[in-house]
Amino acid sequence: MSTAPCPFEPFFLRQGYVVLDGGLASELEELGHDLNDPLWSARVLLEDSEAIAVVHRNFLEMGADCIGTATYQASFEGLRARGLSDDEATGFFQRAVDIAVQSRDEFWGDPTNRIGRLKPLVAASLGPYGAFLADGSEYQGDYGLSAASIRAFHEGRWGVILESKADVTAWETIPSRLEAQVLGELLSEARSAHAWVSFSCRDGERICDGTPISEVVRELDDIPNLVAVGINCTAPEHITSLLCRMRTVTEKPLFVYPNRGGQYDAEAKVWETPPANIPWRQFIAEWRANGVLGVGGCCRVGSAEIRVIRHALEVG
C-alpha cells in the first residue's frame, strides 16, 4: 500500500473538487511563442523559462489548485536529439519541476492568495510515447511497440520525477491500452508515489486505440496509489458518456480536462477549426453528477477559462 496520503484529499474534503490548470502550450501561444517544434512547450523552457513561470502564475491567479510542468512532450530521446546529454536531460526535468514549485510557492507567499484557498499542488506532466513522435500519435495509439519498449521509454523520466519535488504525476493523453498497462506497472512498483492516468478518446466509448474505456480503467483500478483516472484532450461532447462507462468499473476520483473541440492537423501542427464556445456550467453540472472531482482544460483552454471553471464549481 502507498504510505503517503493522497495529495488531493484535502481538496476533496474541504472543497469537494480540485481545479486543474489549462493548456500550458495554448497559453504560451497567446503570449506569442511559436511551438511548432518536436519538443512543443518544452522548447520554451529551454529558451525562455520565465515565460513558463508566467503561465504557471496566470493559472494559479485564475484559480487552479494544481499546475502541470512544461514536460508533457519532453523525453530523454527527444532531448538527446536536441543535443542534450542524459545528465542535462535529467537537469531539464528537475528544472521544469523547480520552476513550477517556485511559481506555486511565490503565489502562496502572498497572504491574499490564501483566502479561501488550499495550497496548490504541482503535477509532473508526462505525455505518451506518441507525444515524443510529435506526429499526432497520441490521438491514435498504434505505435507498433512491445510493452518492454514502451516501458524503456517511460521509466527513465519517471525515475527522475520520483526524485523531484512534484506532488503528483500526471500521465496524460494516453491513447493506448498497452501503454496504460505499462504505466500501471511502473506505478505499482513505486508505492510511495502518487499519479493519475488520463486518456485521450476518439468518441464517447473508446480511447484512441479503440479499446473501450471501461476496460482500460478496470485494469488500473486495483492500484492503490493511482489517485484518479481521467479524460483529457477530448471533445467536451464525449465526456459525459465516457464518465458513465468509467463509473461502472471504478470508484476512484474522476478528472476531466477537455480541449475546445475541433480537428487537429498533426502535420501542420495547427487546429483546423476555431475553438468552440463551451457551456462550462452546463457541462460541469453533468460531469459532477457522474462523480467528477477534478476539472480543468487542455488544448485551447486558457487561464480565462480556468476562472470560469472555478466559478462553476464554486456555485455548484
Image (tube, rainbow, N blue to C red):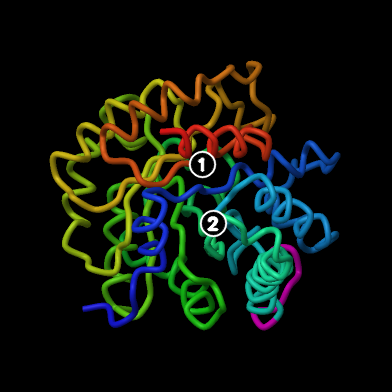
Q: Is residue 74 left or right of residue 241?
A: right
Report the amino acid beneath label 1: Gly
Q: Write down the residue under mark 1.
A: 296
The span shown in magenta is 81-87
Q: Is residue 45 magenta?
A: no
Element at badge 1?
Answer: loop
Number of numbered discs on residues = 2
Q: Residue at x 23, y 47 (%)?
A: 216
Position in image of residue 122 (x %, y %): 56, 65
| 10 Å crowding of disc 1: few (<14), some (14-19), many (20+) | many
Q: Is residue 85 magenta?
A: yes
Q: Write down the residue under mark 2.
A: 66
Note whether 155 is above or below 226 in the view shown. Answer: below
Mark pair 2, 1: CA separation: 9 Å
Q: Residue at x 27, y 34 (%)?
A: 243
Q: In the rendered structure, find residue 138 and report the number of the disc placed on it.
A: none
